[in-house]
Amino acid sequence: MTYIVKPKNHHPLLEKNKLGLTRRDYEGAVSTLCAGCGHDSVSSAIVEACFQLSIESYKVAKLSGIGCSSKAPAYFLNQSHGFNSVHGRMPSIATGAAMANHELLYLGISGDGDSASIGIGQFVHCARRQLNMTYIVENNGTYGLTKGQFSATNDLESKNKYGDDNLFPSIDLPSMAIQLGASFVARSFSGDKEQLVPLLKAALSHKGFSFLDIISPCVTFNNHNTSTKSYDYIREHNDALSKPDFVPSGKEILTDYPKGSSIEVPLHDGSLLALEKLSEDYDPADKIKAIQNIQESQRDGKVLTGLLYADPKAKDLREILNVSDKPLNTMDREELCPGSDKLEGINSGLR
Amino acid sequence: MSKINSINDFVIKFANVNGSGSASANQMFAKGVFRSGIPVSPKNIFPSNIQGLPTWFEVRVNEKGYLGRRDGIDIFVAMNPQSYQKDVSELKENGYLIYDSSWKREFGREDINVLEIPLTKLCVQEFTNPKQRLLFKNLGYVGLLASILEMDKEIYVSLIEEQFRGKEKLIEPNVKALNIGYNYAEENFKDFCEIKVQKSDKTDGLILTSGNDAAGLGCVYGGATVCAWYPITPSTSLAESYNKYSEKLRVEIGTDKNKFAFIQAEDELAAMGMTIGANWNGARAFTATSGPGVSLMSEFIGLAYFAEVPTVLFNVQRGGPSTGMPTRTQQSDILCSAYASHGDTKHVLLIPSDPKECFDFAVEAFDLADRLQTPVIVLLDLDLGMNDWSTKEFEWDDSIEYDRGKVLSKEDLDGIERFGRYLDVDGDGIPYRTYPGTHPEKGAYFTRGTSHDEYAGYTEDGVKNAEMLSRLLKKFQTASSLVPAPVFNQEKNESSMGIIYFGSTDCSMQEALDVLEDQNLKIDAMRIRAFPFNLEVWEFIEDHDLLFIVEQNRDGQMRTLIMAEGGIIPDKLVSILCFDGQPITAEHITNKINAHLSGKPALAAS
């Protein structure tokens, strides 16, 4: 991971958001990933989404595990605290951090090796616990940093760069996430910013576990013509369920979708995800149908993208555990320590 | 027939079938003695099983306050025919055997006093509910003991009333069960037993509680707000104690919301991850586990060490290696705790010796972790953690503030030109940290397990990394002056020989030292309470020609640690070891020391 600091000079006419910040203010260090890596597009989509949402960077915690994807948090939101933890264990770090202070925005970046193999247990339980965070898997079907081994999301029919067959079926993380109780599940493609940015904005605005599986091709090890996670393959087989448009809280809906073809997902902060249906059968509120859609498209050799499932009213972990509205990390001794009188009572109960 | 004759000094052992409700009755017996003013040390010797296997419960009653385990049973309450044979063999000559004579037995020992009570028959006569018939046998023998030991029965009546407060309907049948045994003994066994419990005042200022319960309470008092844990014997009750006390003491008035988060993790790895995440974000967080959990957590412990995230871990040690003896005690995780994780790592250890110290060290662990920005591991063991001890009352000074260590506020950051997360500003090896979300423009950094420079940037510069490792060592040096100092048994060293011991061995050691003194053998003694070792520890070692190191493990792990950290000559350090899963006894210690001094060291190490 590099730590090259970019020059701070901004062009005076750069577009500014509500906080008076430009996109440049949301950037991070210069990426050291391979030129053309999908992950860099995801980073720039995150920059765009945070810029558009006027997020205060310092109120974001970026968390990751190990792998190419997990390096990515260094390449966006310079003013955010980052935590590059150990392989597959980002979810537990995020869980503890979010319990300490629920007022920050938790953005986890993981990869297919990090989440579908070594960290699948933590991924599963993090989703199941409804941790209020945005969990992104930058999914390229391969172990990039260790030079091209198959990952568990690599499709059965997809050969590696050297022509070897993949012997095992792929794990579909979005299906799992829905089944496990994640309350916002989407899949997108790093090369489709138009779809990705609104989905990211919605995911960041959603209260609860937002999961985004982003197909993010590895230009070095998994972009060959027998790969099902190459740029070309995804472009050809991308089957978008809907065209999303994120409408911030208080804004009028300007999207002009044909009557009967749109769905609106209201998010807890008052914003809205408006979706133009591209598939007739599509209903993101229906868990079972969502899983069916994913499975059917997989059978038909397509890569289903868009918002797959959302339950905007789901409770998050803090609510489930009935934890105080005041962040635990701001409580001082007076609030936390029961004091000597209470201790005397405890002593007398033990005599 | 001769009979053991003693007042307020005996060991009673109960043999039961596990899952039959005996533990709470046995506990009640012990508490009754404690309330009579005599210190007790109940020990539950239980199988890793839920129902049906033999289980034992030992209570040492000792007015002098010797609370270590002692071999040789004076009274045996044998309620499990499966284990009669073994149980009866443990009984001392002239001891007392109490058994359920609903089914008469011969025990083949002429040198013991047998007390027959047809408990099952009596309970069947008095109760109709099959569950009660089984359960109340236990209270029946408690009543019987109250009679033959000439105890005040009313103590047990009030213990029953306290236990069933809120479920008053249960009081009457329980008292009835107590009376079944009591009345039967009054009628049939007056003056049978020559062991007596006489009211005393030796429990003034003492409470009866377990190390796990005390440590959980200490976490509440120490300001822990997040507990992430995974169930594992013998640490489970520590996390549960934290939850129990938090539910009582940490609920917001008005909103009824919790000023704590209690999360049962999916495994020990996640439990440690959550603990680190919460601490990183400025909450005091801890996890509790045992040896197998420490093995699983080791990768994360290394991260917390290297990334310098405060972390508190309670390791309630059990019999190892591997799954080992989950329900037996050992002190065999000293090295794996001190050096947990790959690469060059060292961790602060706190080693309490009784529940009071478990409470105190739990509080101190959070201050030390925050001050030193590193994992602090509190080492208990099963005996200390799960058994009730007669221990000093908990104390709290309301004027003491928590030490949150070197944390920069927004105002602090405003005054700093460039924040360096890993800069050794003060020369003590401890850098400054920031919580996420503190300042819009300053103080953000990247926490990572990869090699990093003073500004938390990734670096592959080997010299930089070596500097960082050296600074961590300097920090560890600083730790040695902050951790609890050892406790000395003497004001001034008087002997060329010394004994080093730690943790739950303390109770047996006090007795052993008195026995040795009675044998005109004066040996200085020091109880180590923390790692890194403070200067006093090294001075004590320096001041003595021969040192016995008493440990409840096979390999003399504390000895190894002392040799490794201080370059001490091995010849000077003699191991006294016990690793059979039972708490070490004073007799074991004195026998081994005497054997060594007479030039005949015993071969068996247990």
Image (spheres, coloured by chain):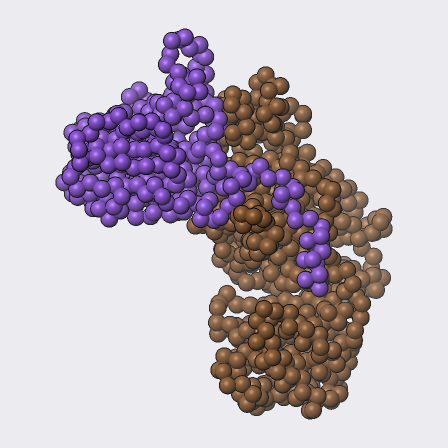
Chain colours: A purple, B brown
B510 relative to B333, above or below: below
Nearer the observer, B394 or A168: B394
Q: Taking A41 as reference, is B579 left or right?
A: right
Quadrant of the image containing the C terminus of chain A: bottom right
Q: Nearer the viewer, residue A333 or B349?
A: A333
- Report the side of A348 relative to B88 (left or right): right
Residue visible at 45% across and 30% down?
Answer: A60
Number of marks in the image?
Answer: 0
Residue A152 rendering spot, x and y as whole percentages:
29, 41
Q: Quadrant of residue B224?
A: top right
Single out the residue that lies furthest toward the top: A12
Residue B477 in the image: above or below residue A31:
below
User: Residue drawn at (59%, 39%), measured in percent from left and top?
Assistant: A331
* Location of residue B115 in the rendering, given as x and y in whole percent from the top left corner: 66, 87
Residue A82 shows in the view = no
- Residue A92 drawn above or below residue B205: above
Q: Is residue A128 visible?
A: yes
Position of the N terminus of chain A by quadrant: top left
Residue at the (58%, 80%) spot, across then down: B173
In the picture, measured across the screen, residue B402 lies left or right of residue B511, that is: left
Towards the viewer: A17 or B467: A17
Q: What is the x, y in percent for residue B367?
A: 65, 40
In the image, residue B295 lies at what x, y percent? 50, 48
Could you tell me which residue is drawn at 74 percent across and 39 percent down? B535
Is B4 positioned to the left or the right of A184 in the image? right
